[in-house]
Image: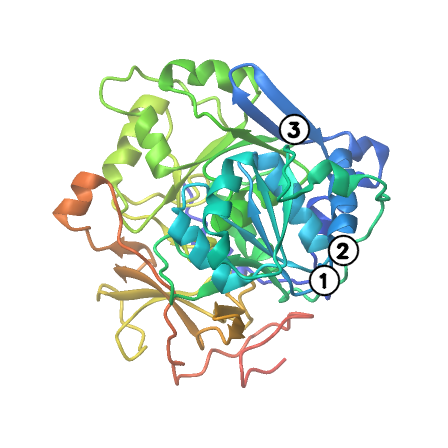
Amino acid sequence: MNDQYSQLYESFRWLLPAQFNLAQPCCVQWAISPSDARRVALVVEKSEGDATTWQYGQLQNISSRLAGGMARMGVQRGDRVALLLSDPAYLVIAALAAWTLGAIVMPLSARLSPTQLAQRLRQAAPRVVVLDDLALAAYLAERARLPAGTRLVGQGMDSEHCIAWKGLLARQPNGLQPVPLPPDAPAMLHFPPEAGPHHGGVLLPHSALIGNLPAFVASLDWFPRGKDRLWVAANWSQADVLLGAVLPALYFGATAIAITQPPDAASLLSRLYRLRISDMIATQDTLREFCAPGHPPLPLASLNAIAAIVTDAYRETDMQRCQELLGRRPNAVYGVHGMYGLAGDSGEKWPVADHSPGRPYPGHYLAALDPADNELPPGVQGELALRQYDRHGHADPLFPVGIWQQGEIQPAPATWMRTGLQAALDSEGRIMPLPPPAAEKAQGSHRSSRPSASRANHRPAPKPKTPLPRNRRAPGSTA
């Protein structure tokens, strides 16, 4: 293989538009022409053979009308809208509606305990919570401890506690256009899974979608190719999955597929053929289940690419078993704090190294730091961190724009966002993580990674060699 990594990494430049609202490129632009509006945007299969299809025109129609209803409820730019929705399609539609108004989306997982749910809602003080019947009981159990004034929208149910989704859409005209926003406007509020009552949430900008595109394209071996149908076998209510896997597929006008009851190995092949899946993004845990000991080989080599979302407890044995049983090795993708793809592999563009989740994707600058925020040389272990500016001195659009703490936006860590992963970078830039403790290996768990405010590294970011229009620059850099 011709190793193209250095050429791709060195030549990459960020190009950001002057305005960027996620609702526009991921939905509205594909609903303008009748032919594009008929493209299939989402497929949700709840049980084998029971699939619901959503076209881009339908997404635009419903999200626009829902945005109009939210506006009548008082939602405006900067307000938080919490989403507790088990159906992935309605989750995407509600997010698009909130972004249309410039609101900040906070997707919440049904796996949260009532206490965790209450903590996040108290922190965020959302103007509106959109939820379904599976989440209503948990919400009502904690309602006495939640901020007063939050209004509920109930999807797929009638309840005295909620405004009905269908009723909110009634008499709302279609055609409400997304409010123009700068790319660094806050789009999503992400709380780490282990966040306690005093931990802040990470605010990710609308431009985070652009920041995730290098990882998305590269990990799927240069997606899209035409007639792409991507199965996202992960929790869509997680910020990294929504911003790094689902929305990029919509950005390219492709089809994103959710299977709410993950198939076992026996039915996997029939699902792939029936749903015409061309590519797959899955968590490392999901792939491990497909490749469990005793399972027969599953010939998935017909897929264009498989990307594996890995944690800091990267397990090389999982990748090797996928190679043996699935017929191809997944491209590892590593991220943290809601940021999908900081580093990883691209099997068609550069060689994959054993025991490593990959190299920094083009546009991202990663380093191992000591406690004083000094970069460590290759081979020396420290804490992996993302720098706010890439190697050319341009702002990384994936870098968080702030920390949400006690109802206010606090500045994001200066220059570095630490990941919590103890690792070294080798001479070719590959991440070499420390092995997790034996207990974690046995349980298949991973260490927590909480956002930590990091002092600015006093060494200035490198000055860019080539101007990049309409982008923020590192302090002291010149055009």
Callout 3: few (<14), some (14-19), or many (20+) C-alpha neighbours within 10 Å?
Answer: some
Residue 357 placement, left or right of 158 = left
Q: How many numbered callouts? A: 3
Q: Are marks 1 and 3 in contact (CB under 8 Å)?
A: no
Location of mark 3 (residue): 227
Residue 396 placement, left or right of 115 = right
**Residue for point 49% across, 26% down:** 303
Q: Are marks 2 and 1 in contact (CB under 8 Å)?
A: yes
Q: Mark 3: which amino acid?
A: Lys
Which mark is first along the chain, 2 or 3?
2
**Residue for point 27% across, 70% down:** 377
Q: Compared to 296, does 236 lie above or below?
A: below
- Viewer-nearest residue: 185 or 471: 185
Callout 2: few (<14), some (14-19), or many (20+) C-alpha neighbours within 10 Å?
Answer: some
Residue 54 placement, left or right of 119 = right
State which quarter of the image contains the N terminus: top left
Location of mark 2 (residue): 71
How far apart are the two marked residues, 1 and 3, measured between alpha carbons?
Answer: 36 Å
